[in-house]
């Protein structure tokens, strides 16, 4: 039960001042007023405190009581997280809807994890065993895909006095009792962890395994490693949410945490309607069996938006500690930064660029720093990959959130409005984007895809750069004045953009491409350029190269050849080489 620690003296929207406060701590979880609104102490000044309230404060008046909990803002961790939908402070939206309807009443409470449901717990340790922080006590089959590992909480160790046998238990039942220095510690399936404190790890590892998304422009041109960090900036309508949806649906992460931070309600509605119907291409199971959703839309209290990304990253760390690879979709960090700006202004802090608080870069760094490939406390490998959307006003990448974010990420997928207007999706610019993970993941691609992957990618990126320069000439004098060798570059790049980079999310075959299909498609296009160039140098014309029968099949290969039909891509490669060689031989005989 919370005790009264002070009373409200001033209300400024979601920022509440209280005076006469005793026994308060920084970042302590509190409840305010008769409706017991959830809040967090963010400033201490003698017996006066400033509270950030995560609910609507309409009607809150000076003199209202403030109740202290003595603990920081925390999330509940345990079986039942997967498949759940929470708001920014981990209130379960489905449970609230069942109790109170579609709108969340002020002061509404519901347990984040179901207290009644029983889980089949299988112990992994025995009485008398000594256990360390992070060690696995047993397992629970949370979904058909996720085996939930029940861990010894961090900073807890000891000797097992008793352990329950294999049976069904609720998350509050004691499953184990530890003896630790004349003290007994009961453990349950439920843990709590402060959202603003990173969970401890053993060590960080190099990120050299790519996160395969099935999106060709990402995996082939601008890959991200598991444990990496990515920013996806773009103006309104350029497809940030679409890119994140595709990655959440098709990436090979074990667990996906999707944070809708300040986005429009209709976008989150689409996600909630689509995901239960989608099937994982690797397992054949529903995608919700590996997904946790944080829905904090733009019409919800702005302060909860600020807490939502910490709620999401803490849940992600919990599954990382179990040895899983987790992908976080934060959509969008700009809305989170705007919440910081509003709260900072109400707390009368000195503003920095464009009104954002001076500590914005620090908070961004703290958030992205929680990504990484790690050795967990129990020695397993797990990772968190953060993919954060950025919504710069007017698509201006020089604004503070985008610029500060670039300092802390290693991959940058810049969305281009012209591509989006031309219905080229994903609208990731091949000129403005970059990835610093190329060298890190090259070894994996050469083993799993093709030993020439790095060379093929380099050839194509070089052609795209040359094409951009040639387009400047074309705009001035037209393409007809260019020699066939240069016009071939334009032809190949157009083919590459339309056949490889452009990908349809609504086509059953094209929505997802395996590593094998991506490499073979890339090899076919590079071969078309190299052998086409050789044929032109032997005397063939570009028109003859373009009229080869195989060209039409190359353009259609992304739709016509499924992921499991790699033999057809091999056959297409053979046909291309034969037809190109025949064309070159014809003109070579005239020389």
Image: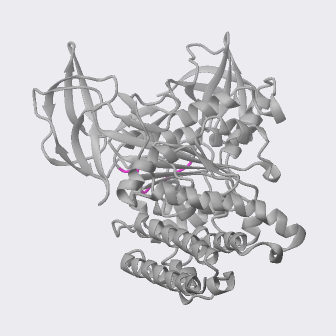
Outermost residue toward the front in this view: 591
Q: Can residue 237 be seen in this view?
A: no
**Secondary structure character of the magenta stretch overall:** loop
Question: Where 578 falls versus 62 (above or below)?
Answer: below
Residue 476 x, y percent position in the rendering: 89, 67
Q: Residue at x 73, y 59 (%)?
A: 416
Question: Where 74 falls versus 531 (above or below)?
Answer: above
Highlighted range, magenta = 80-87
Residue 176 vs residue 591, the one in the foreground: 591
| Residue 85 highlighted magenta (yes or no) | yes
Question: Where 375 falls versus 564 (above or below)?
Answer: above
Q: Residue at x 72, y 54 (%)?
A: 234
Q: Residue at x 29, y 23 (%)?
A: 156
Residue 195 x, y percent position in the rendering: 50, 33
Name the quadrant containing residue 191: top left
Q: Is residue 232 left or right of residue 384?
A: right
Outermost residue toward the right in this view: 476
Residue 403 vs residue 540, the one in the foreground: 540
Q: Is residue 558 left or right of residue 10?
A: left
Q: Which colour scheme is used?
A: one colour
Which quadrant is the C terminus positioned in? Answer: bottom right
Residue 25 vs residue 425, the one in the foreground: 425
Q: Is residue 407 visible?
A: yes
Q: How many marks?
A: 0
Q: In this view, does 467 lie to the left or right of 208?
A: right
Q: Residue at x 34, y 48 (%)?
A: 79
Residue 163 x, y percent position in the rendering: 15, 35
Question: Where 412 falls versus 361 (above or below)?
Answer: below
Residue 504 vs residue 432, the one in the foreground: 432
Residue 239 x, y percent position in the rendering: 67, 62
């Amino acid at each position: 039960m919370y005790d009264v620690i002070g009373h409200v003296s001033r209300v400024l929207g979601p920022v509440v001042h209280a005076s006469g406060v005793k026994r308060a701590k920084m970042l302590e979880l509190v409840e305010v007023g008769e409706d017991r609104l959830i809040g967090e102490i963010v400033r201490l000044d003698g017996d006066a405190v400033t509270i950030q309230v995560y609910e609507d404060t309409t009607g809150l008046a000076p003199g209202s009581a403030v109740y202290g909990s003595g603990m920081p803002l925390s999330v509940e961790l345990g079986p039942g997280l997967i498949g759940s939908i929470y708001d920014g402070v981990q209130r379960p939206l489905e449970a609230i809807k069942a109790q109170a309807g579609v709108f969340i009443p002020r002061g509404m409470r519901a347990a984040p994890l179901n207290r009644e449901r029983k889980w089949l717990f299988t112990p992994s340790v025995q009485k008398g065993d000594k256990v360390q922080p992070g060690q696995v006590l047993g397992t629970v089959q949370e979904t058909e895909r996720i085996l939930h590992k029940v861990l010894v909480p961090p900073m807890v160790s000891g000797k097992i006095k008793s352990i329950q046998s294999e049976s069904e238990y609720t998350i509050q039942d004691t499953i184990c009792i530890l003896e630790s220095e004349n003290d007994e510690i009961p453990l349950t399936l439920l843990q709590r962890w402060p959202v603003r404190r990173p969970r401890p790890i053993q060590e960080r590892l190099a990120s050299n395994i790519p996160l395969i998304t099935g999106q060709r422009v990402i995996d082939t041109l601008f890959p991200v490693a598991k444990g990496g960090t990515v920013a996806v900036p773009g103006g309104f309508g350029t497809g940030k949410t679409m890119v994140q949806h595709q990655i959440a649906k098709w990436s090979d992460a074990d667990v996906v945490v999707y944070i809708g931070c300040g986005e429009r309600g209709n976008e989150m509605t689409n996600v909630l309607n689509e995901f239960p119907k989608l099937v994982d291409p690797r397992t054949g199971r529903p995608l919700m069996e590996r997904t946790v959703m944080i829905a904090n839309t733009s019409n919800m209290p702005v302060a909860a938006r600020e807490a939502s990304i910490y709620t999401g990253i803490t849940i992600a760390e919990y599954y990382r500690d179990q040895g899983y690879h987790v992908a976080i979709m934060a959509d969008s960090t700009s809305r989170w930064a705007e919440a910081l700006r509003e709260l900072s202004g109400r707390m009368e802090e000195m503003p920095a660029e464009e009104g954002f608080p001076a500590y914005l870069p620090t908070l961004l760094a703290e958030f992205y720093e929680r990504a990484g490939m790690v050795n967990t406390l129990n020695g397993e490998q797990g990772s968190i990959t953060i993919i954060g959307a950025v919504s710069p006003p007017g698509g201006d990448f020089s604004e503070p959130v985008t610029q500060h974010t670039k300092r802390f990420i290693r991959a940058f997928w810049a969305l281009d409005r012209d591509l989006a207007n031309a219905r080229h999706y994903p609208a990731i610019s091949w000129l403005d984007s970059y990835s610093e993970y190329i060298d890190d993941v090259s070894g994996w691609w050469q083993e799993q895809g093709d030993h020439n992957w790095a060379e093929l990618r380099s050839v194509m990126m070089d052609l795209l750069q040359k094409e951009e320069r040639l387009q400047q000439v074309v705009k001035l004098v037209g393409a007809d004045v260019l020699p066939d060798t240069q016009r071939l570059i334009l032809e190949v790049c157009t083919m590459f953009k339309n056949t490889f980079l452009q990908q349809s999310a609504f086509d059953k075959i094209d929505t997802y491409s395996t590593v094998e299909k991506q490499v073979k498609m890339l090899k076919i296009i590079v071969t078309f350029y190299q052998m086409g160039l050789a044929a032109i140098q032997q005397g063939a014309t570009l028109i003859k190269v373009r009229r080869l029968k195989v060209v039409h099949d190359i353009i259609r290969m992304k739709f016509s050849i499924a992921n499991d039909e790699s033999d057809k891509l091999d056959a297409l490669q053979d046909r291309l080489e034969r037809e190109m060689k025949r064309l070159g031989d014809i003109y070579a005989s005239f020389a």
